[in-house]
Image (spheres, rainbow, N blue to C red):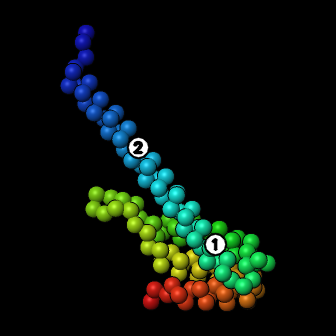
Amino acid sequence: MQGDPTMAKRIGSAVLFIILFLAIWGYQTNKQAERSTEVHDEMVAMFQEFPDFQTHGPLYTQWLDAHHEESFERYFHTASRFHGSYFEEEKYVAATLEAMIGDADAAGSTEQAEHLRELARHFNTD
């Protein structure tokens, strides 16, 4: 018994659609991961300007690592039918620095908290 050629075309079209969808999703996910790494590295580069980075760099990086992913996910928007991917960089920086300042304050790292506050003043979105 022969199969229905219309059904075979539908299945072929569905398989093609799934492959195309996965390819686009994989591409967007890869681009998002690349952008996340770039943003993280840009933040570390800003911290390197702090006068105490040589001695407290790992601390700044630890605080950044604790908040980067959540902030990045909140402010990176993937492409849709209506717009391309975009990233709200100033909001990301402001939110991440605010969280890091909270960590520095909680740790009693007054000097580091002040450096972060000074940097945050440049990204105030109010």
| Residue sitting farthest toward the right | 55
Vertical position of residue 23 compared to residue 39: above or below? above
* In front of the other: 45 or 102: 45
Residue 61 lies, in percent from the top left, at 69, 71
Q: Quadrant of the C terminus?
A: bottom left
Q: Residue at x 38, y 62 (%)?
A: 85
Asked where in the image residue 15 lies, by quadrant, the reply is top left
Vertical position of residue 124 compared to residue 26: above or below? below
Q: Residue at x 47, y 78 (%)?
A: 90
- Within-10-Å neighbours for mark 1: few <14, some 14–19, many 20+: some
Please tell me which of labels 2 and 1 falls first in the chain.
2
Q: Is residue 116 shown left or right of residue 83?
A: right
Mark 2: amino acid: Ala
- Within-10-Å neighbours for mark 2: few <14, some 14–19, many 20+: few
Q: Is residue 83 shown left or right of residue 121?
A: left
Disc 2 versus disc 1: nearer the observer? 1
Q: Residue at x 24, y 12 (%)?
A: 2
Residue 80 lies, in percent from the top left, at 33, 58
Mark-to-mark CA distance, 2 and 1: 32 Å
Q: Secondary structure at mark 1?
A: helix
Q: Quadrant of the N terminus?
A: top left
Vertical position of residue 54 compared to residue 80: above or below? below
Q: Is residue 65 shown left or right of residue 80?
A: right
Labels 2 & 1 near each other (Cβ < 8 A): no
Residue 39 lies, in percent from the top left, at 54, 68
Q: Residue at x 79, y 78 (%)?
A: 55
The residue at which mark 1 appears reads as: 44
The residue at which mark 2 appears reads as: 23
Mark 1: amino acid: Val
Can residue 67 be seen here? The reply is yes
Asked where in the image residue 22 lies, by quadrant, the reply is top left
Residue 40 lies, in percent from the top left, at 59, 67
